[in-house]
Amino acid sequence: MNEAPKIALTDVAKAFGSKRVLRGVTLAAAKGESLVIIGGSGTGKSVTLKCVLGLIAPDSGVIRVDGEDVARLRGAARERYLDKFGMLFQGAALFDSLPVWRNVAFRMLSGRKRRPVREAREIAVEKLRRVGLGPETADLFPAELSGGMQKRVGLARAIAGDPEIIFFDEPTTGLDPIMADVINDLIREIVTEMGATALTITHDMSSVRKIADRVAMLHDGVVQWEGPIAALDDSGNPYVDQFIHGRAHGPIEALR
Amino acid sequence: MAAILLVQSFLASIGRTVLGVCRGAGSIAIFGADGVSHIFRPPYYPAEFGRQLLRIGWFSLPVVGLTALFTGAALALQIYAGGARFNAESVVPSIVAIGMTRELGPVLGGLMVAGRVSASVAAELGTMRVTEQIDALTTLSTNPMKYLVAPRLLAATLALPALVAVGDAIGIMGGMLVGVARLGFNPAVYIQNTVDFLEVMDVVSGLVKAAVFGFIIALMGCYMGYHSDRGAQGVGRATTNAVVSASILILAANYFLTEFFFAGA
């Protein structure tokens, strides 16, 4: 990694009350790279993502995106910073009160990136087509869609602003294996096509193998291992071995 | 020794409660100030404001109207019965008008809208919090305080005076209906009496109260929903807290506003 990383976390720590979720996470993703963070539930994967987005303020450590210290950003600078991002939430997080196309075109309907309504709708329909949804879905409301369709709409919304960085929070949770595979394929295609930097958090190993260029294993609030996807099966790291083989016995304690 | 520990623990629990109340009040004040500041700073969301104005104002009209109608009617009966003890039945029109405009219109209207709007705002924002829709807004470069809170604060503050003005008129009409149909008042005399005794300040003070109540209703709904805990129970608690706190604050604010407007009168 010769050039400066697109996203760099250095010794990031975060505690909620007495619970220390992150104990010094150091991680970097290069421009155009797809980094997947794996780890069990409650190991701080989502907190890591939210710290990068500024939704949660870390207690210590530094987060830099394009070399810029995220903690210092306020007001308009912070909004400009967030323009770089697209995010697919675990439950899609679509706005119930808005039809599908307005969800997808949300960024283009107000604020600095405002465009004429007709143009915003055309872009939304095009993004929906890209994720495999026809124009007839544009006027439906999120509640009228299946879980898989909601994920696709969430994906269309995440890519609608042509972001430089896309976050995927448990993209296949709650989906059947076939739909999960479809979403994984879409993510891989879109990330490659857009040349975006992708940061995915998941515990679905099929997602990891489809999406990742590099993998980082988070446990106990620190990165236990990181390396290229090709090295995952021969990592020699007991945490990674236990996790990818789904064993109940090993260094990761499971509640029984 | 055990008695000392008991007293210590009792005093500690009082201290914790007082600190909790102070922390809560401070947090609500900061949240409210932040929300108000976003009303005046671009970007603006006029469509969202319009939607909230319709929802808080227009759709609350039947509730406020019916409340005012029956309150005005009951008030006329009560004043007539009470006034008869002093041969003062003729005061019915003026007391109904003053009672409705100064006190019952804004307070009962405010409480009814608190039940309807605070609950729905808290439930909506609470659900948005739980389903990560508020986080999604932030990732879409949209400040949730600006998009969700500011339009609701402004809409409720403007809608309540309009609602209460209509409610006042309906309440006075309710009193007149009972006065004419049941108590034998002449309609023209009733209206004349109402107009003669009603002062501008009576109406203005009620409308100012309504604006303050509207702000309280939206503020408590937004605050409780925005800070809702996870899960269905968290949203349920936020909804209950919003209605209870808005109602109590309305009654408290009503006393202080009455003191402000009429203490020296």
Image (cartoon, rainbow, N blue to C red):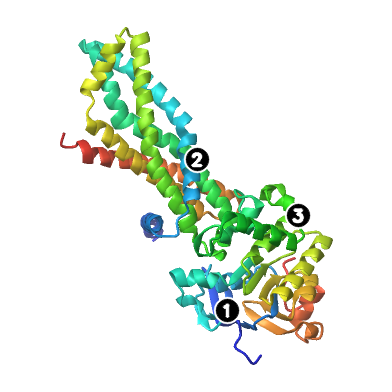
Callout 1 secondary element: strand
How far across and how far down the image is residue A96, in percent? 62, 50
On whether disc 3 and disc 1 are found on a single subunit, the reply is yes
Task: Let me know if marks 2 and 1 both belong to one chain.
Answer: no
Q: Mark on residue A154?
A: none
Which chain is disc 3 placed on? Answer: A
Q: Can you say whether B59 is above or below A171 in the image?
A: above
**A210 vs A244, nearest the viewer:** A210
Other residues around mark 1 within 10 Å, as few (<14) / some (14–19) / many (≥20): many
Q: Residue at x 80, y 71 (%)?
A: A206
What amino acid is at disc 3? Gly
Asked if one can make out residue A201 in the rendered structure from this viewpoint, the answer is yes
Residue, disc 2 = B55
Quadrant for residue A51, please give it.
Answer: bottom right
Answer with left or right where residue B99 lies relative to residue A19. Answer: left
Name the residue that disc number 1 marks.
Answer: A23
* Three-letter residue code for mark 2: Arg
**Mark 3–mark 1 CB contact (< 8 Å):** no
Residue at position x 45%, y 50% in the image: B151
Q: Chain of mark 2?
A: B
Q: CA distance from mark 2 to mark 3?
A: 32 Å
Tell which residue pokes out farthest to the left in this image. Answer: B264
Q: Which residue is mark 3?
A: A134
Give the residue at x 54% y 55%: B229
